[in-house]
Image (cartoon, helix red, strand yellow):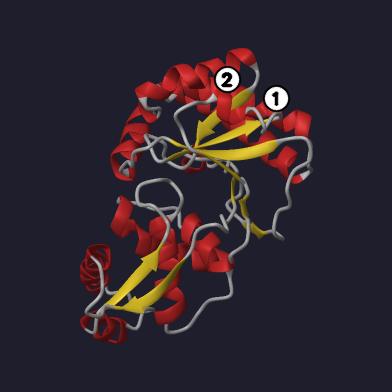
Amino acid sequence: MFGEYTVVRGSQALAIPYQALSGQWRFLDKNSIHTAKNSNRSLQKLLNYFKEKDFYHIEIYKLERDISNGLYFDSNIPLGYGLGSSGALVAAIYNEYAKEKSKNPEELKKEMAAMESFFHGSSSGLDPLVSYLNAPVLVRNDRTLDVLTPYSKKENIQLFLLDTNHSRQTEPLVKYFLNQCKDSEFIRMLEEELSPLNTLAIQQYLNNDAEGLLESFQKISALQLTHFKKMIPDYLFNIWKKGIEEKEFYLKLCGAGGGGMMLGITKNPNEIQEKIKGFNIQFI
């Protein structure tokens, strides 16, 4: 929700589960569709990665047996949308195949980060942790974790997801961000502007400070429009800018950005679909 990219630089981050999406284990049968077969083949590649990295905490042979018998992950989480599809899969594997399940959030996050790195080259482990615990998780500046109680709907504001209508790959965007971090002015913006705004927005969200959150969201939206253009699809640029100028809604990246979903906020949910035509809006 908050802290995408800046969490890499040590800022706070907040991630929450999205209950509308989920997945479960199934086995292939004669009626299985193409996506199920693709899932099974993808699991085989992930298994090979686990073997290569010698993941001792996973029951490799049990997982290998089940994959051979047609195991696949049946999920309604769209791939490449910033909604934690790989995180949910990693959480499901850990839940079913971990030899000993840690109860320590920091240890869980570390183990799942190593597993999810197969998909993105590197991983914070936050997405699979949130899926596994099915609870909001706050990453503090000192890298300690707070597992929070389920969030409630905020008064006077409405958060929503905007579907950009195409997926994206996380790894190239992360590499681009890390390359940008070689620029001193970009680092200054992150450390002096964006990271403090993310921290403030998190506290305002947790304290149900609607007016304060709207203001911080607007500033984050403006900074991302200026400094994260590569992560914003060209066809969304003017809509993003319009929201800021007219103060009707604000958009920000959801995960890596580049496509998939964008996170938005508005005080006028009944009018937002008219303001953002041509895109599917999902209220959260």
Q: Mark 2 is on which residue type? A: Gly
- What's the distance in space between the residues labelled 2 and 1, CA to CA? 13 Å
Q: SS at mark 2?
A: helix
Lateral position of residue 32 relative to residue 241, left or right: left
Which residue lies at the image location 45% right of the left edge and 16% below the top edge? Answer: 238
The quarter holding residue 74 reads: bottom left
232 versus 87 height, above or below: above
Q: Residues within 10 Å of mark 2 (few under 14, many from 20)?
A: many
Residue 30 in picture, x, y percent from top left: 22, 79
Which residue lies at the image location 27% right of the left edge and 66% below the top edge? Answer: 39
Q: Mark 1 is on which residue type? A: Glu
Which quadrant of the figure contains the N terminus?
A: top right
22 versus 257 height, above or below: below
Residue 256's disc is: none
- Please tell me which of labels 2 and 1 falls first in the chain: 1
The quarter holding residue 114 reads: bottom left
Residue 243's disc is: 2
Lateral position of residue 274 relative to residue 124, left or right: right
103 versus 210 height, above or below: below
Q: Nearer the viewer, residue 49 or 29?
A: 29
Q: Residues within 10 Å of mark 1 (few under 14, many from 20)?
A: some
Q: SS at mark 1?
A: helix
Residue labelled with disc 1: 215
Which residue lies at the image location 71% right of the left edge and 32% below the top edge? Answer: 213
Residue 179 in picture, x, y percent from top left: 32, 31
Q: Nearer the viewer, mark 2 or mark 1?
A: 2
Residue 71 in picture, x, y percent from top left: 29, 78
The image shows a total of numbered marks equal to: 2
- Check the image and name the residue furthest to the top: 245
Q: Nearer the viewer, residue 228 or 78?
A: 78
Which residue lies at the image location 52% right of the left edge and 28% below the top edge? Answer: 190
